[in-house]
Structure formats: C-alpha cells, structure tokens
Image: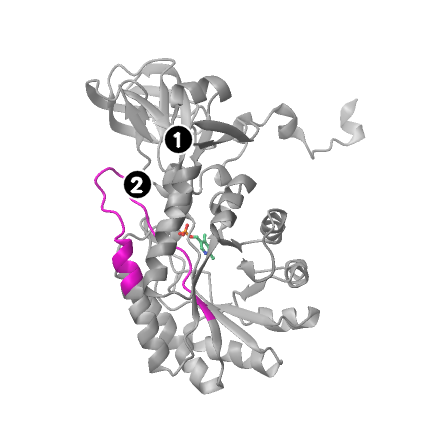
C-alpha cells in the first residue's frame, strides 16, 4: 500500500475508488505482493538448501484466486480438512503437491483423505490402525510435537509443547514409525508445526534441531529413510509499526545449517526440506477497508465502523493488533480514540485508545492493515452482519474474487418444520 498526497493506494488503485466500487467492508489483496512474498522465501531458503519445497496452508486465506496465485508460483497446499483438499484439487493441485494435516480425524476424513491420494500427515499414532483399515498409503508422514513451541500472541497459537493438542509426544514417535514400517509402508516423511507468527530467526533452527534429534534416532533405529522433513509454517510478520521484522536470511541460513548438521549426525540421506508458511505470504498482502458510519461521544469518543469482530476476529480472539489508517487524514492532529464494529457485543469494541486523527468523522474510509491471513477465513455472520466481499488488485486492475453475502446466504440450508408455519 502506498500513500500519495495523503490518500492510500493498494496495487495502484485508490482505496476510495475500491470502496466506492465494491462497498465496505471489503478485503483487498495485492497479487504482486503475494508473489513477491512467496519468491522471497523461496529464493532465500533455496540458496541455503536447494532441495526445498513449500506448501501454502490454505486455511489462512482460502479464496481459490489466492490459492491459484501461489500454485502458479510453485506452492503446493497444506490442508486441514477434506474440503480444503477438494479446494486444492479444484485449482489443479493433487498427489504429492497436497498435504493433509488434519487432526482428530473421523473415519470419513481418513477414508476420503486416503482416496484423495495426497500426502497423509497423521497427527497421532492412534490414527494409524484406523487408517490401515481403509488402505495403505504409499507415503506417510507423522506430525511430531517436539516438546516446544511459541507464538507472538502467547499460548493462543502455540502449536507444540505440553499445552498443545497437536502432534505426537516425542517418546511415542518411534512407535508410530515402527508400526507404519511393520504395516509395509515404504516411504516416509516427518512434520511439525510448532507455532505461528514468530519473528525471532533463532527459533527456527532451534526447533529444527529438536525435531531432527527425534527423527534422526528413528531413522537410525528403524533404518528408515525420510524423504522429506516439513518444518511447518510460523514465519512471522510485524503487526505493530516499528516492530522488528523476521530476519529471513538468518532464519534460512541457520535452519539449513542445523538441518544439514543433524542429517549428517544421524547418517540420514539428506531429506527434502519443506515449509508451509501462510501468514508470511498473504498476511501483509491483504487489507480490510471499512467506513466510519457514526461517531459517538460517550466516556470516550468512539468511531463506529463496519469492521467488526465478525469481519476481522483476530483482535477479539487473540488480542491481536491491527494498524488502522484513515484515508486522507494521516497527517491530521491525533488523539486517543476508540473504534468499534456494529455488533451487539462489547468485544466488538476492539480499539479502546489509539492515536487516530481527531477529526475522524462519518464517511471516512478506514484501512486495517495485515489482514490477509486469518482474516476473511475467520469471518462469520453473527448479528446478521454478513461476510464481506474480497477483491484482488493487480498492477492497477481490480477484480471481484468473492461476492458480498446477501440475506439469502444467511438463511440458506435452514429448514422450518411445517407445524411452525401456522
Ligand atoms: C496454519 C498452519 C500453517 C501456517 O501457519 P503460519 O503461521 O500462518 O505460517 C502451516 N502448517 C499447518 C499444519 C498449519 O495448521
């Protein structure tokens, strides 16, 4: 996003023009920014470890147009459910370009996951006998909990360690691979996903070491060859102005060094290194634009916008920070103001005191930054405030990639018993 003469532009188009054409609230994504983010990670890691591949975790922003951009760049898809596998297939990703990393799977999930022919990444050893009932995958991966995880928002998105629900306990990993080997499975991978939004470069080699120590021993003891090791996502982006960014170069270099060192130490044939970033690709390439509909002077001055927690839930959900810009007023005098959505819930009052332009007024366009990841995908219809539109911009051209929901979408799939109609 750029500012020219006080007005904001996304991908070369004025935000005021996007708001006028598509209405608000609307998610806007910048295609070139997504491509640049992907290339940056790809080129940086490849430099230190050429046998490198990435899977985009589609849950972060599942619009098929976005998944297609990443597919064109060379990404596979990491899927959390059978429907996400279907989404990946709908854009032409299949087989070993798709990873199924769901957890606590039902028999139906397992059956459909197997039939889909993608890489199965099992979250627990207890799922293996159930999986074998339905068939034997050629290639199998297990998700390991290496005993440590972290995130930028405390426990909320810490996905490994003693308080995480994910992955196999370090002591049980060997049993999982032994059972799989005894069942006749021949090709193996290993996986972890320990936390999200990490901007500390040293974290990545550290957890890589933990995982490699666990699977290195498995490789030696069971004489198993790991074709790939997937270190998950978690590459962080700064949300607050002035917050340090992840030193990607350092993260890549140190992670690759640790990966090589540990593969040698355990006599492993160097596995392919996989990553599954999501936030890093789309987070800072997406914005929500909204309108100030009313200004209230109460205990504080509160600007009521159409960006509620139904549109962007992260602040209410995780206490996350999203920076807000006001089109045309960035250089105006500021004072601490409140900002809220339109829901009948006080958690919707997600900005209590923030330095905003003091002449903020009805009709102003507000822009919420870093909303591309875990934004639209977590939106919902509470209070009859329906899901927003999504627009993709590319070098000065805008394209509607999802319609704004309408009333029919709110009652679709509901049924009223005949006896209630009299
Ligand atoms: C959500 C998720 C990711 C992506 O995480 P980011 O922190 O957004 O990079 C990767 N892998 C798995 C298994 C996930 O669930």
Kindly identify the residue that appears in the image at 27 percent across and 56 percent down.
249
Q: Main secondary structure of the magenta part?
A: loop
Is residue 234 something that shows in the picture? no
Give percent across and percent down for residue 119.
Answer: 57, 64
Is residue 321 something that shows in the picture? yes
Write down the quadrant of residue 128 in the picture.
bottom right
Residue 13 covered by magenta stretch: no
Give percent across and percent down for residue 215.
Answer: 42, 76
Label annotation for residue 409: none
Name the foreground residue: 226 vs 4: 4
Quarter of the picture holding the C terminus: top right
Label annotation for residue 239: 2
Write down the quadrant of residue 115 in the picture.
bottom right
Kindly identify the residue that appears in the image at 33 percent across and 81 percent down.
265
Image: magenta residue range? 228-253
| Other residues around mark 2 within 10 Å, as few (<14) / some (14–19) / many (≥20) | many
Give percent across and percent down for residue 3.
Answer: 29, 25
Kindly identify the residue that appears in the image at 36 percent across and 23 percent down.
366
Q: Earlier in the sequence, mark 2 or mark 1?
A: 1
Give percent across and percent down for residue 79.
Answer: 54, 54
Q: Is residue 137 above or below residue 75?
A: below
Q: Label 2: state its secondary structure.
A: loop
Q: Is residue 176 above or below residue 372?
A: below
The residue to which callout 1 is attached is 11
| Other residues around mark 1 within 10 Å, as few (<14) / some (14–19) / many (≥20) | many
Quarter of the picture holding the N terminus: top left
């Amino acid at each position: 996003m750029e500012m020219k003469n006080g007005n904001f532009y996304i991908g070369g188009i004025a935000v005021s023009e996007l708001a006028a054409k598509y209405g608000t609230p609307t998610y806007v994504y910048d295609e070139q920014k997504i491509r640049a983010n992907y290339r940056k990670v790809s080129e940086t890691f490849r430099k230190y470890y050429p046998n490198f591949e990435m899977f985009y975790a589609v849950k972060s922003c599942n619009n098929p147009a976005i998944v297609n951009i990443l597919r064109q760049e060379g990404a596979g898809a990491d899927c959390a459910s059978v429907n996400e596998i279907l989404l990946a297939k709908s854009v032409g990703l299949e087989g070993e370009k798709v990873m199924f990393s769901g957890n606590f799977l039902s028999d139906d999930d397992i059956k459909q996951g197997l039939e889909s022919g993608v890489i199965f990444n099992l979250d627990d050893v207890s799922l293996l006998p159930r999986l074998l009932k339905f068939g034997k995958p050629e290639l199998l991966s297990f998700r390991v909990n290496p005993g440590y995880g972290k995130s930028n928002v405390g426990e909320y998105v810490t996905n490994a360690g003693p308080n995480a629900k994910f992955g196999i306990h370090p002591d049980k990993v060997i049993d999982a691979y032994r059972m799989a080997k005894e069942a006749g499975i021949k090709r193996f991978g290993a996986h972890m996903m320990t936390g999200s939004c990490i901007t500390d470069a040293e974290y990545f080699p550290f957890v890589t070491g933990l995982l490699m120590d666990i699977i290195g021993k498995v490789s030696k003891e069971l004489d198993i060859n790991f074709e790939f090791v997937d270190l998950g996502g978690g590459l962080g982006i700064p949300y607050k102005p002035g917050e340090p960014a992840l030193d990607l170069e350092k993260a890549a270099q140190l992670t690759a060094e640790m990966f090589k060192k540990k593969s040698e130490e355990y006599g492993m044939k160097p596995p392919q290194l996989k990553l599954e970033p999501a936030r890093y690709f789309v987070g800072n390439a997406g914005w929500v634009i909204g309108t100030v509909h009313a200004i209230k002077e109460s205990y504080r001055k509160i600007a009521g916008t159409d960006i509620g927690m139904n549109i962007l839930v992260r602040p209410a959900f995780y206490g996350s920070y999203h920076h807000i810009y006001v089109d045309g007023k960035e250089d105006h005098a500021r004072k601490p103001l409140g900002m809220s959505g339109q829901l009948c819930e006080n958690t919707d009052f997600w900005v209590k005191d923030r330095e905003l332009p003091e002449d903020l007024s009805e009709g102003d366009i507000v822009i919420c930054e870093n909303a591309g990841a875990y934004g639209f995908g977590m939106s919902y219809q509470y209070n009859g405030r329906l899901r927003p539109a999504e627009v993709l911009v590319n070098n000065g051209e805008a394209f509607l990639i999802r319609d704004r929901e309408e009333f029919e979408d709110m009652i679709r799939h509901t049924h009223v018993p005949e006896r209630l109609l009299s």
